[in-house]
Image: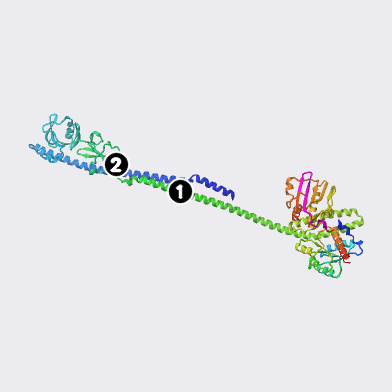
Amino acid sequence: MNAMNAMNPTTATKRPDVLVVDDEPGMRDTLVAILELQGYRVSSAPDGETAFAAVQDGAFDVVVMDIRMPGRDGVSVLEEMGNPPPHVILMTAYAQEERLRTAVEANAFAIIYKPFETRRMLGLVAEASQAVKERSQAAE
Amino acid sequence: MTAATVAAPNARRRGRLRLRFISIVMLIILGGVAVASSLITQGVIRNQERVLLQERTEEAASVLSGAFAGVQQSLGLLGTLAGTGKGGSSSFATAARSVIVPSSEGLMVTTRRGSGMVVTAAAGDAPAVGQAIPADQEPLARRALSTVGMVSGLLPDGSHSWLAFALGNAAGPGTVVWERAEIAAKTSSKPLGAAWGDLIIAIYVTSRPDSSALIAANTKNLPLTGGIQYPFPVGAQKWLVVAESPNPLVGALAQNTPWIILIIGAIVAGLVTTVVEAQSRRRDYAAALVEERTASLRQAVAELQETQAQLVRQEKMAAMGQLASMVGHELRNPLAVIMNVLYLLEMMADAQGSEAMARHLATAKRETSAATLIVADLLDYSAGRAPMLTPVQVADLVAEVLSVVPPRAGIEVAQHVDPDVAIDADRDQMRQVLLNLITNGYDAMPGGGILDISVRSTGESAQITVSDTGTGMDEETRASIFTPFYTTKSRGIGLGLAVTKRVVEAHGGTISVQSTPAVGTSFTVTVRVGATMASVRQ
């Protein structure tokens, strides 16, 4: 489980910023709690519009976002992310093949099906934040 | 339809071999009518023939009777002449000569003298006056004397015979006036005269066809057994004429009518039978055809009904599938939240060091995983999606699945996993495959055992084998395990292996199973190794 090696972000100097986007309060709140427990700085948004605005305003390292939401969906937010874009992990409970292909083409970091193993989600977030770190180090 | 179409030609072939009952009846009836008509006609014509012959014979007899009435009259007149005293004899002779035509005819008058008869007057071929008549002529003379009216008879005289007519007491008491004519040949094949036409006849001087009394016949084939016998009066006695017709009196056409009727009847019977048979066969053929068509129509209707029922079933299934899919999708979010909550509670239990709580949470997590797997299988079965391929490190996937479904009490997991094997797969789907195979392995070992997971690469393929030392399966069960909704478990909906097979095949792979009852079962999934196997994202 190589993903687990990078799971604890507190060892790093800067705590990665994670944005959790889901219209389901239960999902949103538990993910926030779990990620905070792991030492991330976590923000949350209840819909696509808010998430898009949040991404434009603040620099997030990783976005964990549901695909199907009222109004703007996760894939459309992903497509219009600013530069440099944060790594986006998309969650879905539905088999929306067309949207999933679009998400892959828009360079989603990962797509994970609900319900998922919490440890796997944590592993993906860790992988994503590590990748962002490597990217910024390369840019310096 | 096939059975019906096979039976019908056999029936038709049997029909060719013999006539139908109705045709046979028709043939018998018409044939009988033809024969009866012919026989009746034959009877009528025979009767007619006889009537005609009778009429002709009567005519002939009437002519003869008339002719001989003249003879009696002549004898009477000649007798009166002979009886007129002196010179009577010469008057008789003179008058008689004017009557006699052929030289073989003779006329005479005899008178009883003592015990004999003596000629007292004569003319033509007759004994001389004064001569006694031969003794063999005496009986005719006596009969003439004792009879009122002319008698007649045949008098043999050497090689020939005389036809003699005798009228008693015509020239006074005891006298007999005779006329006699020589009959040289009694029979001849020549026609007797116009009065007879073309009849064959025989004339007898008696009322019976006695050959010694035959005086004329135009045939040598005597007696005429089949002819008409007609007695007619000549003087005071009866003669007999027997007549036959060599040719049909009713005409040749009438004679042949019975045969014509029989032939025409036979032809009509044959024709009608043929028509009846043809109609009957046509009707049978049509009936067979109708039966055949009806059978195929019934079959078509049955098939249609079955198809309709199937469509209804399919619609119901589709509706249920849609419902299952909707419910499944809606369950995914709450299940995900429950998983997260369980994780948070696990963290808290760890922090508090509560082993009981950790154990209970593990149970809740296992059951939630089982529910998650059921929902995933149901969703995949009702609306399976095409795999979205990404590089997948199989060892990672195995470890993750084992963390989700850790071995139950009494089960030991043995791993022979090559850590470098990577495949291009839909991670979520392949995870589901492993979850299904591993939980099946656990379920097959209720009393414990060893679950062996091996992952290895064989060149271009990756082989994932999950073996258990459980109950195993018999041949029948083994043949059905990939059928949807087939299950031998007390819980579960029987979709796990059906979905597993579908997913593996959607990845271009194969799945095989080997099983021995009471020994164990081994599933092997073979898929292509990933093109990016060497550069899997770390």
Residue at position x 7%, y 37% from top?
Answer: B87
- Chain of the residue displaying label 1: B
Left/right placement of residue A75 relative to residue B61 reads right
Q: For the residue labelled by badge 1, is the local secondary structure a helix, a strand or a loop? A: helix
The three-letter code of the residue at mark 2 reads Pro
- Chain of the residue displaying label 2: B
Q: Give the range drawn in magenta.
A: B513-536
Q: For the residue labelled by badge 2, is the local secondary structure a helix, a strand or a loop? A: loop
- Residue B53 quadrant: top left
Q: Name the residue under label 1.
A: B274
Residue at position x 16%, y 30% from top?
Answer: B134
Q: Name the residue under label 2.
A: B246
Residue at position x 67%, y 57% from top?
Answer: B312
Is disc 2 in contact with disc 1, using a CB cutoff of under 8 Å? no
The three-letter code of the residue at mark 1 reads Thr
Left/right placement of residue B422 relative to residue A39 reads left
Q: Which mark is residue B396?
A: none
